[in-house]
Amino acid sequence: MAGHSKWANIQHRKGKQDAARSKLFSKLAKEITVAAKMGDPDPDKNPRLRLAVKEGRSNSMPKDVIERAIKKSQTGDADSYDEIRYEGYGPNGVAIIVEALTDNRNRTASNVRSTFGKNGGNLGETGSVSFMFDRKGEIMFKAAVGDVDSVMMAAIEAGAEDVESDEDGHWIYCNDTDLAEVSNALEAALGESETTKLVWRPKTGTPLDLEGVKSVMKLIETLEDDDDVQSVTHNMEASDEVMAAYAEL
């Protein structure tokens, strides 16, 4: 299966960088504020906040923006957000999970449903596609931390379940409830990770040709452009040739 990492890299290269970065910072700040409001404002005492701050730093989010998002959680100005997961199918039967933080459930549900419908997809009920994914912890390291064998040994000793490596880096997966413990052990062995987060990992993929990839990516990019949407996960897969051709579009 074409790994999560490769899709992320292609989307990064194709993105309109300035606009995409501004929107990303806004979404990361929202997650930081929500995490801090739900728990302790000290990242060392709040695992969810610690992961959110780390994700912000890994995306070059300015320190003052991170600190401002945490402070906002402790004031009366902080909005209340609901966490909602939407599930559905895109073109060609690709399974898609959309995670959102919203202060207006009706608005978000209407926007997500409309986006699916306008882009050849179909929004389903909760549970309609999540059974095709596993909830996992994902820890990513740059390729420079070591070769595949050394990273694999470190992952095994840390209690991880799987490793994917390519020229861009190493992606290590573990049980979702073991993420903090495994990431701490890996960082002790390999140094600080690039990202540490919970993800939906597809059990099986839906193979697509170039035209299929283009149609599904249009849906995904439109969903990601919604301010309420925090993440979009899919089980689309494609050959290296198809992915290279898409990256050149």
Image (cartoon, rainbow, N blue to C red):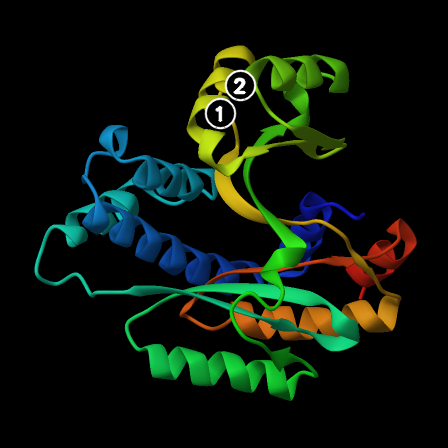
**Mark 2 neighbour class, 10 Å CA radius: few under 14, some 14 to 19, many 20 or more:** many
Q: Which x, y percent locates residue 228?
A: 40, 70
Residue found 67% across the figure and 56% down from its top? 132
Q: Which of 171/130 is in front? A: 130
Residue found 43% across the figure and 60% down from its top? 22
Residue found 37% across the figure and 83% down from its top? 107
Left or right, 96 with respect to 226, comes to right
User: Marks 1/2: CA distance?
Assistant: 5 Å
Left or right, 6 with respect to 161, comes to right
Q: Which x, y percent locates residue 150?
A: 70, 12
Q: Which x, y percent locates residue 71?
A: 16, 48
Q: Secondary structure at mark 1?
A: helix
**Mark 1 neighbour class, 10 Å CA radius: few under 14, some 14 to 19, many 20 or more:** many
Mark 1 — residue?
A: 183
Identify which amino acid the numbered label 1 is placed on: Ser
Q: Which of 224/246 is in front? A: 224
Q: Secondary structure at mark 2?
A: helix
User: In the figure, 204 relative to 138: above or below?
Assistant: below
- Which quadrant of the rendered structure holds the C terminus? bottom right
Q: Is residue 68 visible?
A: no
Which label is found at residue 199? none
1 and 2 marks in contact (CB < 8 Å): yes
Left or right, 138 with respect to 100, comes to right
User: In the figure, 114 relative to 234: above or below?
Assistant: below
Q: Residue furthest left?
A: 76
Image quadrant of residue 230?
A: bottom left
Residue found 75% across the figure and 20% down from its top? 148
Mark 2 — residue?
A: 186
Image quadrant of residue 64?
A: top left
User: In the figure, 248 relative to 45: above or below?
Assistant: below
